[in-house]
Amino acid sequence: MEGEVVGKEISVAEKARELAERPGVNPIQATLNTIIEKGITTENVAALEKVCDLYERMEAVVAKKAYMAAKTALQAELPNVMATKAIPSKDGSIRSRFAPYEEIMAVIQPYLVTHGFSVAFTVRVEPDGKRLAAVCTLSHIGGHSESNEFAVRIGQGPPGCSETQADGAARSYARRGALCDALNIVVDKDTDARMEGATISPEVARNLQERVRLVGADSAKFLKFAGAESFASIREGRLGALQKALDQKERIAKAARKEPAPPTDEPPRTASTGELLL
């Protein structure tokens, strides 16, 4: 019994001295130092142990306050992240856009470093094998950290991808979601000049409109496919896909007249993109 008490005294004494040597200001520091200076005995070891526990609780409170203050400052400075990665539809038009995890990190990493934060992830597959969850842990240099979880269905991934690629896509999606939720990152999905270039020139707009008329395409459907309200507001980044669609419309029309189609590097296609322009 006596040996157990002595062993406990040594353990508490080592912990107390380790806490007393930690940098920073803790309101329990003075009390801790006073007990250590007077000497640790069987009579005060219980009180010292309680003081050590209180010291650590106070450290946790201080660390959390520093974390919250730094996170507030961080979020006030974080810019919106532009969604630049296009997800195409089967007809070649852009269905939507997203911001890859790597691009999000490239934008926010300097702000994380400035405010003393780091991020880490753990990923797990749920027991049913159909869902994958990523946990983003945001840690502050002051010692406090918080975690946020985001789960996704694994699915089949993008068209034509392998099972491994589908798993990787789900993993990236989950990490992206967990990170954005943890920091309230806003991903701007609006289509603007930064993503699709400036509007085409008036001359190009006139030529394009005339070509649409000559091939007998529906102007309203063509503009809808172009994502524009008028020919003058079509973006340069869309021009290539639109020209290809008109090329296909011409081939379809010539085939109907039993005329040979002009040579092309693309394999013959049935009406898909062209149907949008009829």
Image (cartoon, rainbow, N blue to C red):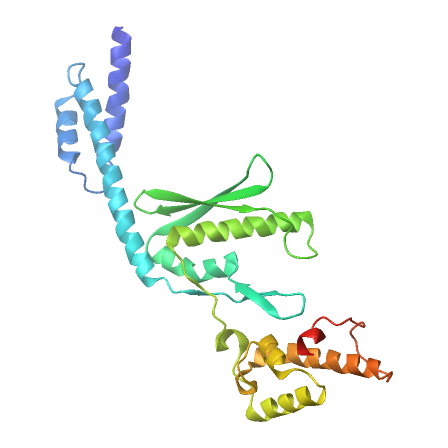
Quadrant of the frame with the C terminus: bottom right
**Residue in front for this viewpoint, 66 or 170:** 170
- The correct choice, above or below, for 135 with respect to 101 in the image is above
- Name the residue furthest top: 1
Residue 73 picture location, percent across and down: 29, 57
**Residue in front for this viewpoint, 97 or 76:** 97
Q: Residue at x 33, y 52 (%)?
A: 116
Q: Confirm whether residue 23 shows in the render.
A: no
Quadrant of the frame with the N terminus: top left
- The correct choice, above or below, for 221 with respect to 188 in the image is below
Residue 14 picture location, percent across and down: 27, 25
Q: Residue at x 37, y 59 (%)?
A: 111
Q: Confirm whether residue 119 shows in the render.
A: yes
Q: Which image quadrant for residue 270?
A: bottom right
- The correct choice, above or below, for 45 with respect to 225 in the image is above
Image-based side of 17 in relation to 92, left or right = left
Residue 237 picture location, percent across and down: 58, 78
Residue 132 picture location, percent across and down: 55, 43
- Say how many tags the image has: 0
Image-based side of 266 in relation to 112, left or right = right
Q: Which image quadrant for residue 91?
A: bottom right
**Residue in front for this viewpoint, 12 or 98:** 98
**Residue in front for this viewpoint, 278 or 156:** 278
- The correct choice, above or below, for 112 with respect to 29 in the image is below
Q: Which image quadrant for residue 183?
A: bottom left
Q: Residue at x 55, y 92 (%)?
A: 202
Image-based side of 205 in relation to 144, left or right = right
Image-based side of 62 in relation to 215, left or right = left
